[in-house]
DNA sequence: CATTCGTGGCA
DNA sequence: TTGCCAAGAAT
């Protein structure tokens, strides 16, 4: 049995000087330059943008980014804030462990780095919420460090450039691609910011997931997938994520315009966010409701909410109360106070 | 190494 | 409607 020859490694080495120089030139002429987080080299602002942009589209981040900076203009103000307020500013953006790690990271910068982000990818990667790729992005943008990123865009661009046929669901294959990404880095530190941005810009525009526009690509004649006419086949990623389904009942208690909210535990789905009391089935909800009122809760239309790995069906049941009992650990929240509470998207929609 | 984390947009 | 995916990291 002859092992498949690893042509991608030789390809990466052969392309190394040309690819970077072309990408850098293209980025400077055709890439994005007007995004808010591109108007600065302040590590705090660049870091904030990189965290928000993890698994999140640029258009979604834009509004959050400005509002967040107005409330927390410096890393110290973020570090000194309460986690609940950080979560409230993050509500709707998703992946809430990012907000939790963001807060922890700000405190680490304050307490262990004298209030300034450490100026190297290696040190940045040791901070909460900053992995290898995010560390490299910050270091290349702010400090011109020759450090490779490997996000979704880069996996697609390099996967096609090298016709990399390893399954990126495998960590061993991803490790190989990391090495290629480092091989392809530009020689000059002065080119690093444009190079890193160029990889992102190319992946977000011409080298898109579906219908890539190879004819306009600055590296079309270097691209192995383009040569084969099989750009859409890269990168290779077998998905084994099976979506499951969960079903719960939500008790919406109201008293004199206030709503009863409970804070979810610090781990798991919607960690630290405020929600309605959740029940495994309708019988348990009704059992709780009978302790609070002689009235029966009003059934509201079901909510179908899709998370990454499961579909969630929620059945809201609304129950106005004459007297304000305390059904457990939680808070009666007036509507005008709701913005200070971090609510998951479907609840914000339901209450809105 | 596999799983667990949100949300909105798009074909 | 359904599935896929977007500037990933932590466990």
Image (cartoon, coloured by chain):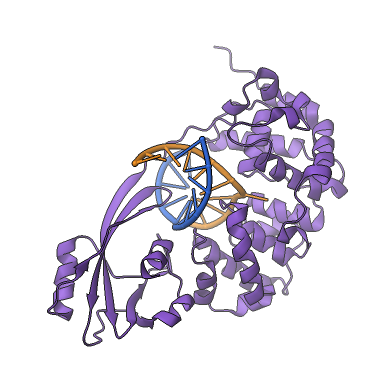
Chain colours: A purple, B blue, C orange
Indicate left or right for A236 with A137 as reference. left
The reply to whether residue A110 is in sight is no
**Along the line of sight, the residue nearer the viewer: A113 or A35:** A35
Q: Quadrant of the C terminus of chain A?
A: bottom left
Q: Quadrant location of the N terminus of chain A?
A: top right
At a point 68% along the width and 54% down the height, the residue shown is A135
Seen from the viewer's position, the closer of residues A215 and A249 is: A215
How far across and how far down the image is residue A166, in percent? 58, 28
Q: Is residue A48 above or below residue A202?
A: below
- Could you tell me if residue A322 is visible in this image? yes
Q: Position of residue A242 (x, y in %)?
A: 37, 40
Q: How many marks?
A: 0
The residue that appears at 74% across and 48% down in the rendered structure is A197
Query: Which residue occupies the foreground of this view, A59 or A82?
Result: A59
Tell me the residue at 80%/26% (across/down).
Answer: A14
- Residue occupying the point 78% across, 40% down: A185
Extreme-top residue of the structure: A1
Q: Position of residue A148 (x, y in %)?
A: 72, 45
Q: Looking at the picture, how far across and down is residue A131, in whole percent?
A: 62, 53
Placement of A157 over or under A125, stated as above or below: above
């Amino acid at each position: 049995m002859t092992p498949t020859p690893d042509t991608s490694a030789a390809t990466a080495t052969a392309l190394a000087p040309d690819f970077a120089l072309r990408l850098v030139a293209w980025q400077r002429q055709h890439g994005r330059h007007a995004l808010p987080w591109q108007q600065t080299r302040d590590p705090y602002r660049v870091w904030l943008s990189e965290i928000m942009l993890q698994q999140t589209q640029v258009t979604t981040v834009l509004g959050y980014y400005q509002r967040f900076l107005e409330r927390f203009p410096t890393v110290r103000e973020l570090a000194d804030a309460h986690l609940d307020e950080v979560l409230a500013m993050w509500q709707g953006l998703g992946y809430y462990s990012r907000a939790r790690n963001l807060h922890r990271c700000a405190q680490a910068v304050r307490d262990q780095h004298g209030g300034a982000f450490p100026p190297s990818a290696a040190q940045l990667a040791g901070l909460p919420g900053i992995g290898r790729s995010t560390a490299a992005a910050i270091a290349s943008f702010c400090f011109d460090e020759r450090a490779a990123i490997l996000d979704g865009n880069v996996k697609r661009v390099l996967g096609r450039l090298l016709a990399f046929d390893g399954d990126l669901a495998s960590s061993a294959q991803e490790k190989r691609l990391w090495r290629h990404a480092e091989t392809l880095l530009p020689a000059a530190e002065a080119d690093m910011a444009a190079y890193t941005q160029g990889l992102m810009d190319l992946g977000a525009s011409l080298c898109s997931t579906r219908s890539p526009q190879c004819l306009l690509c600055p590296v079309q004649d270097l691209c192995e997938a383009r040569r084969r006419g099989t750009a859409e086949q890269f990168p290779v990623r077998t998905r084994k994520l099976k979506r499951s389904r969960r079903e719960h009942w939500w008790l919406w208690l109201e008293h004199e315009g206030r709503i009863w909210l409970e804070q979810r535990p610090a781990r798991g789905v919607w960690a630290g966010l405020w929600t309605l009391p959740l029940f495994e089935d309708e019988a348990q909800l009704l059992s709780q409701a009978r302790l609070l009122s002689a009235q029966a809760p009003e059934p509201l239309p079901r909510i179908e909410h899709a998370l990454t790995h499961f579909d969630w069906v929620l059945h809201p049941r609304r129950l106005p109360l004459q007297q304000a009992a305390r059904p457990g650990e939680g808070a009666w929240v007036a509507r005008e106070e709701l913005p200070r509470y971090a609510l998951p998207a479907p609840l914000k929609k339901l209450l809105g």
